[in-house]
Amino acid sequence: MDKLRAITYFLHAVREGSFAGAARALGVSTPAVGKLIGTLERDLGVVLFERTARGLLVTSAGWRYQQTCGAAMGALSDADEEMRGFASRSRGTLVVGVQHTVARGCLTAALPRFHARHPEIELDVRDVQRITEEDGTAVDVMVAVGWLRLQQLVKREIGASRFVVAAAPSYWAAHGMPAQPADLAQHNCLSIRGIGGTVLDMWSFVQGSRTESVAVKGWLTASNAQRDVALDLALQGHGVVRVLDWASRAELLSGALVPVLQDWESPEAPPVNLLYAPQMRRVPRARAFIQFVTEVFRQIDVAREHQLFPSRQPLYLRRHYEKASDARPRVEG
C-alpha cells in the first residue's frame, strides 16, 4: 500500500464529504479512492468512515487520525513549499477582498503565517460587502460567507459556519439564561441586517427531531457592516447576540461571551466561500493564498471535533423580506 497516497485520499474524503468528491478533487476514480481507504482502514485496524444512506460520516477515530495526519501533511507541504521557493518564489501583489466578519474572526490572525511562508507576496486587503460579479473582477481572490450564486467566478466552499447564541455573564446574571429556545422571546436580542437587507430576527434551533424557530426582538438592529456594534453592546452586558463560532472564538473561549442552549444546534450553516476568476488558478501567488485560506478553515473544522457541512439557503433569503420572521417560520436545510 502507498501509505502517503492513502492518507492523501483519506484527507480529501474528509474535506469533500464523500469518496466521489475526493475523486474529483484528485482526478482519479471513485472506486480507487474507496479501495485505498479501505486498505488503510484494514492496515490501521480501525473504521475511519461510517458508510450510511446519507453519505460518509467520519468516526471519532477518523477525526483523531485526520487531526494528526493533517498536521503532518501540513508540515510536509510547508517543507515542500520551502524547497520550491529556492527555485521559484511566488511574488507580487495579490488583491484580496474579504468580509469584515472573516477578517476579524480568523483571517487577520493567520496572515503573519502566510507572510512567513511567502515573504515576497504583498497583500492588498479590501473590504467587500455585497458579493457580486463586479466585486470578483475588482480583486484577485475573495473570501465571503453566505449562499452565493455567481456564474462567472469559480466558487469553492471551504468551510461552514455554526451559529452560537451568547451574552455577557453580567447579562445572564441580571436576566437569567433561557432553558428553551422560546425563552429568547423574553430577552433583548440584538439582530443583524443581512447583506441583502433582511433583518435576521428568526433564530432557529434543532434538537434531534425537534425544530423550533423564535422571532426575537430587541432595541437595536445593526447592519452587516456594523455588526461589531451589536457585538460590543453584548460584551458590555446590554443584550443577546447570535454569532458565528469561529468569528467570536476569542470572546467565547475567554468567557466574555457565555453561550446558551448548547444542547440545540442551528439548522443554518452558511458556507465559507473562496471566489476567484478562472484564470487566477494559473497565478502562483493566488494559488498560494487559496491553499492557505483553505488550510485555515480546515483547522477550524478540526478544532470543532466534528464535521460541519454547509446547509441549504434558508427560505427567507430566497426572496426579499424586510424581516426573516415575515417568511414562514421554518428553515429548510
Image: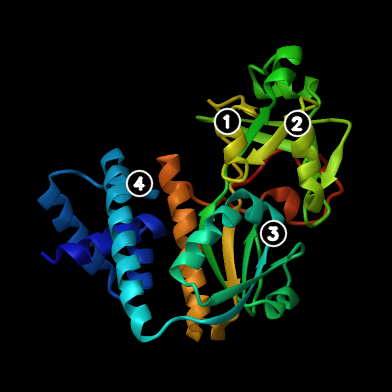
Upstream in the sequence, badge 3 or badge 4? 4
Residue closer to the observer: 291 or 13: 291
Look at the image and tell me whether residue 50 can be seen: no
Label 2–label 4 contact, CB within 8 A: no
**Residue 156: image location, x then y, percent:** 53, 67
Residue closer to the observer: 161 or 226: 226
Name above or below for residue 30 compared with residue 53: below
Residue located at (14% from left, 57% from top): 39
- Cα separation, mark 2 vs mark 3, equals 21 Å
**Residue 237: image location, x then y, percent:** 76, 25
Upstream in the sequence, badge 2 or badge 3? 3
Q: Which residue is mark 2?
A: 234
**Residue 167: image location, x then y, percent:** 69, 27
Give the secondary structure at mark 4: strand
Of circles 3 and 4, the one toward us is: 3
The N terminus, quarter of image? bottom left
Name the side, left or right, on which 299 lies relative to 67. right
Label 1–label 3 contact, CB within 8 A: no
Upstream in the sequence, badge 1 or badge 2? 2
Q: Which residue is mark 3?
A: 99
Q: Residues within 10 Å of mark 1 (few under 14, many from 20)?
A: few
Residue closer to the observer: 326 or 110: 110
- Cα separation, mark 2 vs mark 4, equals 36 Å
Q: Amino acid at mark 4?
A: Leu
Q: Residues within 10 Å of mark 3 (few under 14, many from 20)?
A: many
Residue 254's label in the rendered image is 1
Residue closer to the observer: 326 or 245: 245
Residue located at (16% from left, 55% from top): 40
Give the secondary structure at mark 2: helix
Of circles 1 and 3, the one toward us is: 1
